[in-house]
Amino acid sequence: MKPKILEEFKNLITPLQKEQKEALKQNIKTYGLREPLIVWTEENVLVDGHNRYEICEELKIEPKYVFYSFKDRFEVLSFIIENQIIRRNLQPYEKIEIYAKLKDDLNRLGFSKKPSSEGKKHNTLLIIAEKTGYSHDTLHKAFYIDKNGNEDLKKDLRSGKISINQAYGKLKKISTGGLKDKFVFPPFSILDSSSADWICRKREWFNTIGSATETRDGEFGRTSVEEDEVKFLSHINSGTSVFDPVLCEVLVRWFSKKKDSVLDPFAGSQVRGAVCGLLDRNYRGVEIRGDQINANELVMRNLGVSDKVSYVEGDSVNLSSLLKGEYFDMCLTCPPYYNLEIYSKKDLSAMGTYAEFIENYSKILKDACLLLKNNSFFVIVVGDLRNDEGAYYGFVYDTIRILLDSKLKLYNEIILKNSIGTAAVRAANSMKTKKITKIHQNVLVFYKGDIKKIDKTPVDLSDI
């Protein structure tokens, strides 16, 4: 009795190309079918050998069968994938494409080195990465191609004519009308820091400048400083967030020019200074912690940008006296979010009440505005936070109010979408009291001067 053919099993593996199938046909015609076809015993369904089966039907050759017992279709799918990947010399995209067809089934298939604990699902992306040997970034790109690419592009990938990175680049260029090439990332009002492109670029930046919270064995790989120095960086920044270098790069490229001077009244870790220096801007940061300045200056020396990046130790409440007589082409900063993170016992994050915090914060912003040259941008990254009762303080709105009172004009508002991370875990608990879990920050772009005189110089895309 002939086995049944299920389209699900037949179409799981990419069909042979016309010339490949013709070569197989000639081989069978000359030498006969040397390898038996595999049939699922319990269901009498063909599991392996669909191309050979069709050729035998065409040549009127009676194929040989071997019968395997499988407990269910999931075990059959697992067998087909493993068998085909071992047998064929598949291109990277072909391997990922097979698993992409089964993303919904992978948890049930149980492809994992370590069984998940009872009641928990497998991490599908981790499973596919494990089985194919490719990184999460490569998988994200392949899935994007699978969803958005045309058949011609996929054929080129299957034949090895083009790499996954090249195909992904082509698709993204088409989808953004070439905006990525012109502006690093498309200049839309939402920037997605969880995208594969963003994550890749972020890792490249941290590999270059080092991460203030990761050791040499940390997430972003080796840094540019020695091990003891990295431990020092980690220690002084323990428990605090680190500014996103890709966001810094985008903002610096979009709203300033080479050789411009950049003021940062809340300098913090090395990120903004390092990015500005490597992009050929002259950065001036004010930081209250001397040990942080020492750590930052060490990084700048290692990067070779000490001539472009400098720090002033002191409290930014005294900004006007600390930087007396200095004026800047841009202000780029990210203030403490009141007491959400404590940086020291003396700075704004240590203020007793929110009202005290805002009073000092307001003075700093207003002084920074006075140090900003006319017809320049003031860019500040902020996010709101909740008080003890659970209501928002309105920190974003307070920031806007202060800068508008300083005669600046609100010119752009950008939402920085962060990765979900632990938000997925926190969201269920937060919704018990109807709190929406926040996964974004606000990037506020103000302008000082006559908007008609905004510089129309093309965005700087020079290499680092």
Image (cartoon, rainbow, N blue to C red):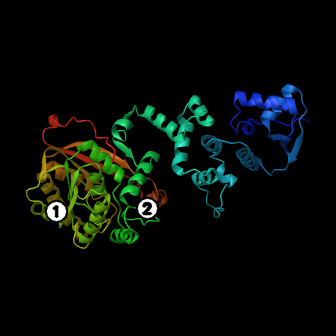
Using the image, tell me which numbered label, if any, was put on residue 399. none
Neighbour tally class for label 2: few under 14, some 14-19, many 20 plus, Cα within 10 Å: many
Up-down relation of residue 17 to residue 202 (above or below): above
Q: In which quarter of the image is residue 391?
A: bottom left
Q: What element carries label 1?
A: helix
Neighbour tally class for label 1: few under 14, some 14-19, many 20 plus, Cα within 10 Å: few
Which quadrant is home to the N terminus? Answer: top right
Between 211 and 378, the one nearer to me in the picture: 211
In the displayed structure, does residue 133 sit left or right of residue 356?
Answer: right
Q: Is residue 203 visible?
A: yes
Between 262 and 265, the one nearer to me in the picture: 262
Between 175 and 33, the one nearer to me in the picture: 33
Up-down relation of residue 456 to residue 438 (above or below): above
Q: Is mark 2 on a helix, strand or loop?
A: loop
Disc 1 target residue:
359
Up-down relation of residue 381 to residue 454 (above or below): below
In the displayed structure, does residue 143 sit left or right of residue 282?
Answer: right
Using the image, tell me which numbered label, if any, was put on residue 222. 2
Q: Which amino acid does label 2 sit on?
A: Arg
In the displayed structure, does residue 268 sit left or right of residue 429?
Answer: left
**Separation of marks 2 and 1 at Cα, in angstroms:** 41 Å
Q: Which amino acid does label 1 sit on?
A: Glu
Q: Residue furthest left?
A: 325
Between 346 and 282, the one nearer to me in the picture: 282
Say which residue appears at 14% left-offset and 60% top-offset. 363
Say which residue appears at 72% left-offset and 47% top-offset. 86
Instruction: Count all numbered tags in the image, as a single digit.
Output: 2
Position of residue 264 measured from the top left corner of the image (x, y, whole percent): 22, 56
State which mark lies toward you, 2 or 1.
Answer: 2
Position of residue 95 measured from the top left corner of the image (x, y, whole percent): 64, 44
Say which residue appears at 44% left-offset and 45% top-offset. 197
Position of residue 136 measured from the top left corner of the image (x, y, whole percent): 53, 51
